[in-house]
Amino acid sequence: MARMHRYESHLVWQGSTGVGYAGYPREHRVLTPPSGTELRLSADPAFRGDPALPNPEQLLLAAASSCQLLSFLALAALAGVDVVAYEDDAEAVMPEDQTPVRITRIVLRPQIVVAAGVDIDQVRQLVSQAHDTCYVANTLNAEVVIEPAIEHAAHIPAGTVRS
């Protein structure tokens, strides 16, 4: 039998919707066992949420970005490719004029720095493979686009182990 991964969270909200759409609180908490990490969330400000708190749409985007990173790093490490830095300025779009309203497109823009001498074409292939194996991207029905920028690090030879 195949191994099954299971994820849990606990969501808590209190308030009253009796005050109408404009007046009920959007803030809520999500706890993730077993660590008990607590996230304070709200709705997008366009839906009367608190702009100081993250919203579910941002977390979905963050999950896609994080999954791409982790999938890529695993593949790079297994291939012996020395990645020394990775940043991603990701973006998601959710048009309100389409029904059902949903995030329709996610663009990940990883900026990847690899050690000198690393084959950039191999890194591009690993980025693509990471997208194909990313659990979150495979779960979503939105288009997920990867637009990587890859460069060599200055003065770090390939294969150098950093502590």
Image (tube, helix red, strand yellow):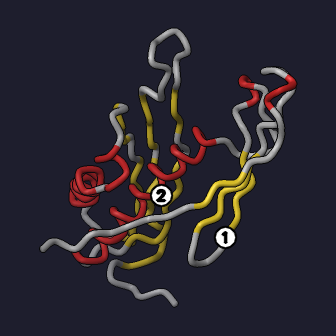
Given the current orientation, which residue lies at the most extreme top position? 97
Furthest-front residue in this view: 18
Q: Residue at x 31, y 55 (%)?
A: 134
Check disc 2 and report the residue beneath it: 66
Q: Nearer the viewer, residue 145 or 31?
A: 31
| Disc 1: CA contacts within 10 A as few (<14), some (14-19) or many (>=20) | few
Q: Secondary structure at mark 2?
A: helix
Tell me what residue is drawn at x 36 percent, y 37 percent.
144
Asked if 109 appears above or below 38 in the picture, the reply is: above
User: Please, what is the three-letter code of the amino acid marked with disc 2?
Assistant: Ser
How far across and down, in percent of the image, does residue 63 sit? 49, 52
State the residue at coordinates (83%, 35%). 16
Q: Quadrant of the N terminus?
A: bottom left
Q: Secondary structure at mark 1?
A: strand
The residue under label 1 is: 37
In this view, the residue farthest toward the left is 1
- Seen at 52% across and 45% down, the residue is 60
Please name the amino acid that badge 1 sits on.
Thr
Q: Please state the horizontal and vertical placement of residue 4, each as a whole percent of the image.
A: 27, 69
- 105 and 59: which is toward the camera: 59
Query: Of the residues under marks 2 and 1, which one precedes in the sequence?
Result: 1
Q: Is residue 95 left or right of residue 6?
A: right
User: Closer to the camera: disc 2 or disc 1?
Assistant: 1
User: How many angstroms separate mark 2 from mark 1 (CA)?
Assistant: 17 Å
148 w.r.t. 159: above or below: above
Q: Are marks 2 and 1 in contact (CB under 8 Å)?
A: no
Looking at the picture, how far across and down is residue 114, in whole percent? Answer: 39, 66
Nearer to the camera, 115 or 92: 92
Query: Residue 10 has which mark?
Result: none
Measured as percent of width and height from the top left, residue 26 is found at 77, 37
The 10 Å Cα crowd at callout 2, few under 14, some 14 to 19, many 20 or more, is some
